[in-house]
Structure formats: structure tokens, C-alpha cells
Amino acid sequence: MELSITNLSKTYPNGVTALNRVSLQISTGMYGLVGPNGAGKSTLMRTIATLQEADSASIMLDRLDVLKEKDAVRRMLGYLPQEFGIYPKLNALDMLHHIAILKGVRDRRQRGELVTALLRQTNLYDVRKKKLGTFSGGMKQRFGIAAALIGDPKLIIVDEPTAGLDPAERNRFLNLLSSIGQSVIVILSTHIIDDVRELCTRMAIIDKGEVLMESSPQAAIDEIAGRIWKKMIDASELPLHQEQFCVISSHLVAGRTQIRVYSDTMPNESFAATEANLEDVYFMKLSRTTVVH
């Protein structure tokens, strides 16, 4: 199974260009799509999910034309948007039965077996009769995945699935996604870099509607290995360091500011070498820093 996106563009009536000639090749497995808020990730997800029209593009899911054969695509699609509605007074069991009926699973025995299997897969079987309105954020996300898996989809899209989850729920959800992604295409749209590093075999960084990088996470890290340096400074010194060095990120550590700098060689003796990571790649691409070999 392969999803092929070619020259996808979308400009909204207010003149904002959400996507500008985006092209991606996505195969079976976990694929990460990262970028800041407003980068165009959600527009891309909605277009692939047949919920939004493109100005121009070719999108093929194997031999299916996504933009023209929408009903056929929807039968192969599982979609978990960033925010999705639930009926708070219904329990998980009844709601999944309802969704399965809407997706064409009419046989009661078959539907019962399917719903039970999904509840067990998402670790919700023991709370299947609890009202959805009482679910925690992580439980709601796992319920959303259970709903998305009805119909044996070949393409699953999840948009910012771990935002707001506590560490334990995030781990449960990521483990669930990882198990699903072994046999289907799973597109994970997120701004949490660690989610991509832990799960995805391929990734793209998108900003202002354009693809800045497409690679495997490890290959992207290897490209800048040995060129990242760190230093502790006072916050007041940051502007001066930004003028003198290629500062790609800064954050607080024990009340002081740590900067991370890209340089082929040690900038000066006040810096220490540090291991490159995927966040470094991300911030470099957003700053349009060019890697020099």
C-alpha cells in the first residue's frame, strides 16, 4: 500500500496559502508529519481524508484517485481528528456498535466480535459500559482509535493524538499506534517531536505550507551529528549569541538559559559538544539553516 501526493496546493478565500505544491510518498508503516501551528498539517490531513477540496493536486492511494473516488477511499480510511465529538451519555460498547452499523457491519454476531476485539485491543474492554463523558483524555483518544479501526482501514490518519495526555496515557497510546502501524499506513500529524522519534520510520517537516525536509528520523539526525554545541548563558546574553553564532534553540535549565548552536567546528572554548537530536533537526529546518558538509 502506498499513498502518493503530488503538487498539492490549497489557498483559502482570505488569501492564506495553506499548502504550496506539497509532494510526498508514504508507504506502509508509521509516517510522521511535524510542524508548528498553522504550518498546513491539518489542511493536508483533511484533504487526504476527503473532507476538503484541493486547488490542485494528484493524490493516489495505490490505484484509487483520492480526489475523485472519495466513497471508495472512505471505506479504506480511519480518521482521528484532533478534536472529535462523542455522545457523553452513551457507553463505549453501544457507541462502537452504532459506528459499526454506520460503516456497514450489519450482521449482529460479526459486529459483536469486531467491537469486542477493538475494545480489547485499545484496553477499554473493562470500561466498555462506562459513559463516554466520564472517560479521561487518554481513554477518549483510545476510543477514537477503536472507532477509526472499524472497517479494517488501510490508511489511518491521526491528528495531534497525544496533546494534553499525561505521560502514562501517552505511552499507552503510542504503543497502540505502534502495533497498528505494522500492517497499514498510519500518518501521525503532531508538533511533539518525541512522538515521531519513537514511532516513525519516515517523516516530513512542513512549515508555511511547504515541505522543508523528508527523511527517516535517524538519517536526519546523522546529517548534523558532530555539529551541535551547547552552552549555558544568562538570558540577557541571548541576543548577542544569536548575532555571533547559529543558535538553533534555547531553553531554561535550572533557571539559566541553555543554547544549542550549529557549527562545523567548536565555536569557542566556552561551548561543549553535545549529541544531536531530532529537535535540533526540526529547529534547524524551521530556521532554514543549511547543513554544510
Image: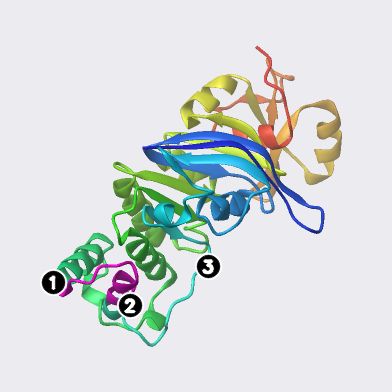
**Quick check: is 7 in the magenta stretch?**
no
Of the residues shown, which amino acid type is indicated by label 1?
Arg
How far separated are the C-alphas under marks 1 and 3? 31 Å
- Marks 1 and 2: in contact by CB < 8 Å? no
Is 59 in front, or is 23? 59
Where does the magenta region start and end? Answer: 96-109
In this figure, which residue is indicated by the disc labeled 2?
A: 95
Which numbered disc flags the more N-terminal residue, 1 or 3?
Answer: 3
In this figure, which residue is indicated by the disc labeled 3?
A: 83
Is 133 in front, or is 40? 40
Q: Main secondary structure of the magenta part?
A: helix
Instruction: Give the side of residue 129 with respect to residue 282, left or right.
Output: left
Q: Name the residue furthest left.
A: 109
Of the residues shown, which amino acid type is indicated by label 3?
Glu
Where 43 sits versus 28, above or below?
below
In this figure, which residue is indicated by the disc labeled 1?
A: 109
Point out the image quarter for the N terminus: top left
Where 108 sits versus 79, above or below?
below
Looking at the image, which residue is at 64% across and 40% down? Answer: 206
Measuring from the top left, give residue 265's x and y in whole percent.
Answer: 68, 14
